[in-house]
Image (spheres, rainbow, N blue to C red):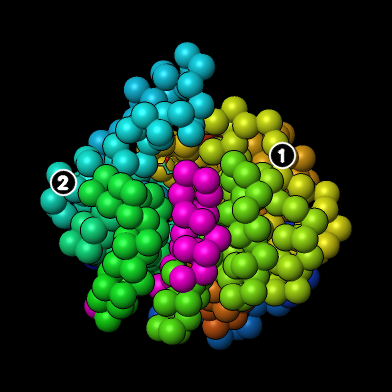
Amino acid sequence: MNLVANAPSADGVWRQLRLLPGALDDGSPIDGEVALVVVQGLIRWIGPAADLPAAYRTFAQHDGGDSLVGPGLVDCHTHLVYGGQRANEFAMRLAGASYEEVAKGGGGIVSSVRATREADEDTLFALAAPRLQALLAEGVCAIEIKSGYGLALEHERKQLRVARRLGEAFGVTVRTTFLGAHALPPEYAGRSQDYIDLVCKEMLPALAAEGLVDAVDVFCERIGFSLAETEQVFQAAKALGLPVKLHAEQLSDLGGSELAARFGALSCDHIEHLSAEGIAAMKDSGTVAVLLPGAYYTLRDTNLPPIAALRAAGIPMAVSTDHNPGTSPALSLLLMANMACTLFRLTVPEALAGITRHAATALGLQGTHGALAVGRPANFVLWTVREAAELAYWFGNAPVHTVVRQGKVFPTI
Ligand code: NIG
Ligand code: FE
């Protein structure tokens, strides 16, 4: 499968466009018709169509159909590569079991570990490809993909290799995250420290040496790893010069966010139980707060992340699918924007910045993704809507006219 080779080039002049508010890197508006020029896969010019320099008028012309043009979406937290699925646990939770009870009963993450270990690389690729395609069809141009369902060197490697292959096959920016400390594998039951040693001393250095790790994550939680264990993994990441991020304060407040902030983490994710101290620490470190309404919804959580306090502190808030087979089998980033508004009370501009600009920052991609600017790779979406609020308003269909990803055109209508 090579979708990229067959996709036409986006080079030329894109016209009949209007600008999505907040789409430009500097936030400035453009009234009326907008033109955007792509040369060799990069944005060369963007501005009022009336000001288009004459030199570009002879270039190939693309009709934008009066769409709203905005940056490609960024899904900054996913567990996209795994074997099996966990619909049975969905049924168990509907019958009253909690996520922690399911996990303690041998289900949860560990059941996905069993299925992932059984699958070979090609099988994992074939399973993940349609999930990725669903996200791409909706305008995702950069995505984070975590390991964490292998929990042994060869199986974590398999997941990360598949993540890299997906990026190449689909022409999408993929940032890989090593999440070896996601859960204690059954063969290490009662030997948590031994497993953390394996993660820090063998798995992470080997996978980093193979170029498979862009960042390092830990599930810091009662049913995951302690604060002290998280710190050991962060130290190992730091020694290798890798950025960290954290599944923090999802089910309880262990103080993970303060620790992550101390390590200059890219992001703290979930944070339903984030404390005032955690917010203060994140504010000082520039760490992005990643909100995951799909997991909140699936687990029927009732502890809202402290949105008003995050807003007051000026902490950038990203929104992501957290796609995973247990707590968020979600394949629509726009639906997450909708849920961030309806469940978490984000404003529409906050939700849209959350799936573009701030999501890019959560991946360290703020220089290339999440906003439109001259010199950046051509990653943009033409939306068939009259106004920006519609992007968070409709759910169940993606109002996409065309996606331009890495300088290639992927029409959807
Ligand atoms: O982000 N919280 C931990 N990790 C995932 C869930 C993984 C799973 O249940 O398989 C999450 O929600
Ligand atoms: Fe997650």
- The residue located at (28%, 52%) in the rendering is 188
| CA–CA distance in space, label 2 to label 1 | 36 Å
Amino acid marked by disc 1: Leu
Measured as percent of width and height from the top left, residue 125 is found at: 22, 51
CA neighbours of label 1 inside 10 A, class few (<14), some (14 to 19), many (20+): some
In the rendered structure, the answer to whether residue 87 lies left or right of residue 316 reads left
User: Ligand 1 falls in which quarter?
Assistant: top left
The one nearer the camera, 201 or 11, is 201
- Mark 1 residue element: loop
Is residue 168 magenta-colored? Answer: no
x then y, percent, for residue 272: 66, 44
Question: Disc 1 marks which residue?
Answer: 304
Q: Residues within 10 Å of mark 2 (few under 14, many from 20)?
A: some
Q: Is residue 82 above or below residue 278?
A: above
Q: Residue at x 61, y 59 (%)?
A: 256
Segment tinted magenta in the rendering: 210-232
Q: What percent of the width, then of the height, locates residue 248?
A: 58, 54
